[in-house]
Amino acid sequence: MKTLVAGWFSFEEGHATAGDLLAAELACDWLESAGISYDIAVDPPFTGGINWRLTDPKNYSQIVFVCGPFLAKGTLETEFLTHFAGCRLIGLDLTMLESLDKSNPFDVLLERDSSVRVNPDITFISPRKLVPVVGVCLVEPYEQGLTDITNTAIHRFLASREVAVVKIDTRLDTNTTGLRTPAEVESLLARMDLVITTRLHGTVLSLKNGVPTISIDPEAGGAKIKRQAEKIGWSVMFTVDELTDEKLQKAFDYCLTQEARTKAKECCDRSQKMLEEVRDEFIRASVDSGDSEVELVRIDSENYKYENFRRIEIDSNYQIYSGDLYKKGLKKNVKQLFKSIRRMV
């Protein structure tokens, strides 16, 4: 004789949760460890079991209803209890919605909580199976981008893997995922195991935080995403016209490795080093408005921990290093000092 395991996953309108299914798997494991054969009752969209309404109750030695709230007089509960009237009933990990002195249809009740007692939910000891958390950051359709092709390929790939997908939108004028600030966007990207993206900043902000990306340039032949990846040395990049399911599968497996995380950090470090020159050029262009007395220099000094110093020359005998002001804790006054010196000249 078999045991039938049922729960809210056994009803199409049962609103079954992840906890319900984890509890059912655990109950089945316990039965199997005791050498007890069982069937599990499921309704769509769940598969892999039987329809309890089509069963002969005489084929089961006992019925287990596992996890969730239970009200004996509820519509679904009444239908279930009526079908299995006369069978031995076990209630496992249930929240009993009526006081037990008023209603308890179970021969054995190991409740989660009731009017009599409270137990920890059994999913505390369910097997822990974690899957990759994948950020998906897609660009909106635009004229040059073949986004219908890239999006179809990405969704087809994701459907082939057991992953936890997190949709991430980098747009902030209007955001489809409820993010409001750059910090919120970057914080979410930084916590992914990997990111699949057709956006440039989906790539940049992920690699900046050591998160590997599958970067896809939606323009035929590649455009800004391709150029960015090549410049910083990130190799997991495809253009829309070279994208295949096989490449996505291999790239996904690689991005989950420690090697990929190390490479992502290397790309970030390399980029930050290259951007020192961009920063210097920008400051030089901003400070030097044509006045010959303003110059940017780089000073390597054990006494100062700042990489960049401005030197103001009023004449060959008068120089001010802004580093001196920083050392004295007068950083806020540097900008005003520059303005004052220019007015003097």
Image (tube, rainbow, N blue to C red):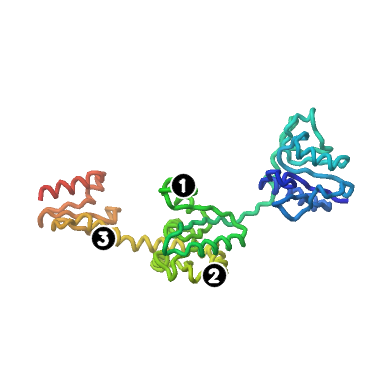
Tell me: residue 1, above or below residue 147: above
Callout 1 crowding tier (Cα within 10 Å): few <14, some 14–19, many ≥20: some
Near-viewer residue (134 or 344)? 134
Q: Which badge, 2 or 1, is on the more N-terminal residue?
A: 1
Q: Residue at x 43, y 56 (%)?
A: 205
Residue type pointed to by label 1:
Leu
Q: Which badge, 2 or 3, is on the more N-terminal residue?
A: 2
Q: Which badge, 1 or 3, is on the more N-terminal residue?
A: 1
Tell me: residue 116, above or below residue 133: above
Q: Secondary structure at mark 1?
A: loop
Callout 3 crowding tier (Cα within 10 Å): few <14, some 14–19, many ≥20: few
Residue lying at the far top in this picture: please name it.
101
Q: How many marks overall?
A: 3
- Relative to residue 162, is residue 242 drawn left or right? left
Q: Which residue is mark 3?
A: 281
Q: Which mark is residue 244?
A: 2
Near-viewer residue (222 or 295)? 222
Q: Which residue is mark 1?
A: 179
